[in-house]
Every structure is written in C-alpha cells, then in structure tokens.
C-alpha cells in the first residue's frame, strides 16, 4: 500500500495558499539578491585583475551595492522565517484540533483496546515532532526552489558546458540520500511506535504507584522499563546512524564537484574560451549555492524522518472509523418515561467468545433494578449496551417504547444519570465539577446537590468552599470525597433514569448509609439500574438480576432469592457469614 503521508501533509500546507504565496515572494527576493551577490563579486575581481591597479572608488561602489543587496536580502529572509513558522503553526494547530475532535468521536471500544499513554503520545509528542520537522522542511524547501533555479540560471549564463558537470553529478546525491533515507524512515517509524508503548507503560505504572509499592513490584517494573527502554535505545541508535550518513555522503560529492570545477574552469580560462578569473570565482560560489539546499535538507534528515513517522501515526488515528453518526431519521428522546425493555439481546466483545446470549428483560417506569453476579458475569456490559457505548449483535433494546438504535445517542445518554466506580473529576473548582452536566445550575441547586450527596460537610470546611480548586487527577481529595462529588454531579440534573455502578464502593460505612438515604430519595419515581458487589446496598431493589457468564440465572426480590438458595444466596452468605 502506497504511503501517502507526505502528500497529505502537503495538502494541509496548501490550505494556507495566501501565506504560502507571501513566503515564496519573500524567498524570491531574499535568494535572488543572495544569488546576484557572487556575480557582482566576480565583476569586482575581474576589475582588479584587468585594471592592473586597484581603483578604490569603483570597489567602494561595488561594496556598497553588495551591502545593500545582502541587507535587503536578510530582511526578506527574516520575513521568510516568520511566515514559515506561521504556516507551520497553523497546520499543526489544525492537525492537533482534528486529532482531538476525532478522539472525542471514537467509540468506547477504541479506548478499551488502546493504551492511554500511546493515545496521549500521538496527540502531544507526535504532533510536536511533526511541527519541528515541518518547520525545517518548509524553510529549506521554499528557499531551496528559488536558490537552485537562480544558481542554474547564472551558471548557464556564465558557461553552459561547465554547468553540465554540476547538473549531471547532482542526481547522484539524490540516489544516495534516497537509499539511506529509506532505511532511516523504517527505524524512525519503529522508534515512534516504541515511544508510544513506553509512554503507555510509564503512565500505567506511575498512575498505580501505590499498588506497585504495596506489592513490592518496583524491581519488576524497573526491569520491564529497562528492557523496553533498551529496545527503544537500539532502534533510536540505528535511526540516528543511518540519518547521519546522508549529509557527509552528499558533502563528499560536493567536494568532488568543487575540484572538477576548479580543474575545468582553470583550463577553460587558460584556453581563452570566454571565462575570466572572476567568472570562475562566481561559478564555484554558484555551485555551492546550488548544492546548499540539498545539504541543508540532508542535515535535517533526522527531524524530517521523525516528523514523517509521527505524521503517519497521527493519520492512522484520523483514518480510524469514529462512532457511526446518527441516521437522518433518528428520533430525539425528548420525554422518556423510564420504561426499558431487552428483547433476545446477544452480544460479544469477540465473535468467538459469546458473552450475553438471548437476554430479555422488561423494566417498568420507576423500577429499581439491581444487577449482581461474580466478576466477568457481564454486569457492566449491560450498562454499556443500554448507553450504546457498544452496539448489540442481535435482538433489540427499547427505551420508552422506541428502539435504542433509532434514537440519537446524545438524547439517549442525556436521559441517564451515571455514577461510576471510577471517579473522574476535571481540573477546576468543585463548583464546576458538580455542575458539569448542568453548566447553568444555580448556587442553590449546586449546594442542594452537594447536601443530598453528603459532600457538603467537607466542602464547607474548605477555605474556598465551592470555589476550591481540584488539582490534576484530584490528588488533593480523598477517594471517598471524589466519589461524593461524582454523586452530587449526577444528582444535580436528576434525569429520568439512573445508572449506579458500584457508586458507594469507595466510601466508608457511615458515609455509605447517608448516600443510600440520598439515593433512595433520588430514585423515587425513576428507573434505576444499580450494579453492586455490596449486597447490603440492594436489599430494597424491586428486582434483582443475578448474572453469570452473561446470562440471567436468577431473578426476584432479596427475600425470595435467599429462600431459593441459589447463586445469590451463596454470594450473600459469602459476604455476611460470621
């Protein structure tokens, strides 16, 4: 399959045609003045040699002309650098925004199947690498086109025959650099992949450092990190080795060109075929200018190769299929009544490993449904299917009498309030976190939600109260306090249906009792799905579903299930025996 990474980057650059035209104009003036300089210098040399004596007034005019040319050329070169940076920043800003927006559209299965560290690496390090490489490439490419064209024009004007020496040998540089760069690109692609894997492992270990220390896993983590780091080092060394070969190889050919120009130019001058000493001096300078863009590009081969490898990883992300858009005729769930029905639902994360088979359930409005079962029984999977985080393989899920597949995802998900075991709080104030699902909430609503959740006690003791800042990863709050805030966040919007996934697993018993009281009040008249391992928290449920390997093996109220003596009774006795 053809690699279209470079062409895709070029198309993104061409989106900014106006700025690109200005950059080309600045490059044209800057480089043409620089190219004209050697010709003027050659005239000065010829004047000195032919005149037999130095005429300082003429030399002063030539030097003044050169100073003006190089000064104006330098100013235009400065603007070329500014415009190249501006184009690069605009391209990279668009690329980073598109990557982030695409991530926001990806289904939950993508995040479940990819390392978070690798995802973050693509969004940050890879984008920065593309930025560095693109900036270097743009500066060298824009100025290089003008320099090469101008140098060839002046050389052909001075001597078409000797110009062929430069023109015929130069393609050898491209052949050599192309062969080496092919190897370089391979190792830089490997380096980008290994960097993402190493970042993912580092994030995993650092995020769970408390567990690592508790189980004495530091040595094992160091060994794994060292092994992966060593592999990255080896690939990085190979990438640097091959990329470092390009520039010396092309410069060696340049030196050969200089020698040949000196030999043939001197012979032509002695033979009197129209070349002067000043012309030879200008010719050698032009050959240098002709080769300079090639040398400059090869000198930044490392950055360009790394940028291409990183760009490829970003485009791989952008090419992934996002969560399918809602069909044009999808209905908006505007006034849900809380009725939910599963009809012969089948689902599997992997086609060869069925999880839920022929699952049916009818939930009337206001029903409190508890879902229990051993680990891996499919409890959270039911919630994922209900929220359409995953699509069912067959069967049907109805919400308020409408097929969930025919309802817009946004309106469906807004109909549910969720409190999960994993507490996520964004960096910002406590006020902003509680009102996350309802940004226009009033002060009274925020305080009322915090009181109902049992969070107002610790909030009121903070010096800034609701305006207290939550640090990154909420490290300045205890796990229980974080959980209370997520509960308050769900309470403030009070949607018609609730999903509580181990919502009280991280709080103490006393706080749990307070939250249970608040939950009972919040669940009044609302359809609720409660996933719980603490069976004491679901005794009052209207119906308890006992799942095992994706199937409902028992169903009923707490007392009847205990009397039945099945899986639920065994789970209950395991928690409360003795």
Image (cartoon, rainbow, N blue to C red):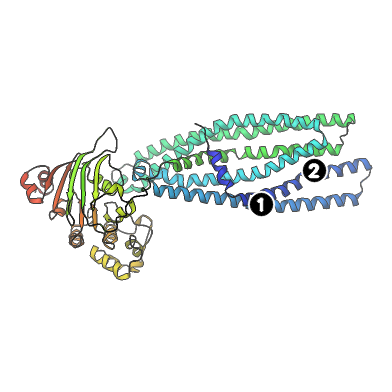
Question: How packed is label 1: few (under 14 Cα within 10 Å), some, or many (20 or more)?
Answer: some
Percent x, y for residue 465?
33, 68
Residue 459 position (above or below residue 501): below
Give the total of numbered labels. Answer: 2
536 left or right, relative to 432:
left
Question: How packed is label 2: few (under 14 Cα within 10 Å), some, or many (20 or more)?
Answer: many
SS of the residue at dot 1? helix
The residue wearing badge 2 is 38
71 left or right, relative to 234:
right
Q: CA distance from mark 1 to mark 2?
A: 26 Å
**Could you tell which of marks 1 and 2 lies nearer the N-terminus?**
1
Percent x, y for residue 515?
20, 60
Point 64% across, 46% down: residue: 139
- The front one of 240 and 29 is 29
- The front one of 326 and 94 is 326
Point 66% across, 37% down: residue: 294
The residue wearing badge 1 is 22
533 left or right, relative to 222:
left
SS of the residue at dot 2? helix
- Can residue 368 be seen from the camera position used here? yes
Location of residue 265 by image quarter? top right
């Amino acid at each position: 399959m053809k690699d279209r990474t470079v062409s895709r980057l070029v198309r993104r650059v061409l989106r900014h045609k106006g700025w690109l035209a200005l950059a080309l104009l600045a490059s044209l003036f800057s480089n043409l003045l620089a190219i004209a300089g050697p010709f003027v210098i050659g005239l000065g040399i010829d004047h000195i040699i032919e005149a037999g004596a130095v005429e300082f007034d003429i030399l002063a005019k030539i030097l003044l002309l050169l100073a003006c040319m190089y000064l104006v050329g330098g100013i235009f070169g400065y603007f070329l650098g500014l415009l190249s940076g501006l184009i690069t920043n605009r391209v990279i800003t668009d690329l980073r925004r598109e990557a982030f927006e695409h991530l926001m559209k990806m289904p939950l299965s993508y995040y479940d199947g990819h390392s978070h560290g690798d995802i973050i690496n693509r969004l940050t390090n890879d984008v920065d690498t593309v930025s560095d490489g693109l900036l270097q490439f743009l500066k060298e490419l824009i100025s290089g086109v003008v320099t090469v064209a101008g140098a060839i024009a002046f050389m052909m004007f001075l001597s078409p025959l000797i110009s062929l020496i430069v023109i015929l040998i130069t393609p050898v540089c491209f052949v050599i650099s192309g062969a080496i760069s092919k190897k370089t690109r391979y190792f830089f692609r490997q380096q980008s992949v290994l960097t993402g894997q190493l970042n993912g492992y580092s994030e995993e270990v650092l995020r769970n450092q408390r567990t690592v220390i508790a189980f004495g896993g530091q040595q094992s983590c160091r060994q794994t990190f060292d092994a992966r780091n060593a592999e990255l080092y080896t690939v990085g060394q190979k990438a640097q080795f091959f990329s470092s070969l390009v520039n010396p190889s092309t410069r060696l050919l340049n030196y050969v060109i200089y020698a040949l120009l000196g030999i043939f130019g001197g012979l032509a001058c002695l033979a009197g075929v129209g070349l002067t000493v000043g012309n030879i001096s200008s010719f050698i300078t032009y050959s240098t200018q002709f080769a300079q863009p090639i040398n400059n590009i090869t000198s930044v081969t490392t950055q360009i190769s790394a940028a291409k490898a990183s760009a490829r990883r970003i485009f791989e992300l952008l090419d992934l299929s996002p969560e399918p858009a809602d069909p044009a005729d999808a209905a908006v769930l505007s006034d849900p009544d809380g009725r939910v029905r599963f009809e012969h639902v089948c689902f599997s994360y992997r086609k060869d490993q069925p999880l839920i088979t022929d699952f049916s359930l009818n939930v009337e409005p206001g029903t409190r449904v508890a879902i229990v079962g051993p680990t891996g029984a499919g409890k959270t999977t039911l919630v994922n299917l209900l929220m359409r985080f995953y699509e069912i393989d067959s069967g049907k899920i109805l919400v308020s009498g409408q097929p969930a597949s025919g309802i817009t995802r946004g309106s469906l998900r807004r109909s549910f309030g969720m409190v999960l075991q994993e507490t996520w709080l964004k960096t910002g104030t406590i006020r902003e976190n509680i009102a996350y699902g309802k940004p226009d909430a009033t002060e009274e609503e925020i305080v009322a939600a915090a009181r109902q959740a049992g969070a107002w006690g610790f909030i009121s003791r903070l010096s800034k109260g609701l305006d207290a800042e939550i640090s990154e990863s909420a490290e300045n709050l205890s796990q229980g306090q974080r959980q209370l805030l997520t509960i308050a966040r769900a309470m403030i919007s009070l949607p018609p249906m609730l999903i509580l996934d181990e919502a009280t697993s991280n709080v103490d018993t006393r706080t749990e009792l307070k939250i249970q009281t608040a939950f009972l009040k919040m669940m009044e008249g609302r359809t609720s799905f409660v996933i719980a391992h603490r069976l004491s928290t679901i005794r009052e449920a209207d119906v308890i579903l006992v799942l095992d390997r994706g199937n409902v093996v028992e169903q009923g109220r707490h007392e009847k299930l205990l009397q039945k003596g099945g899986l639920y009774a065994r789970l209950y006795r395991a928690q409360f025996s003795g």
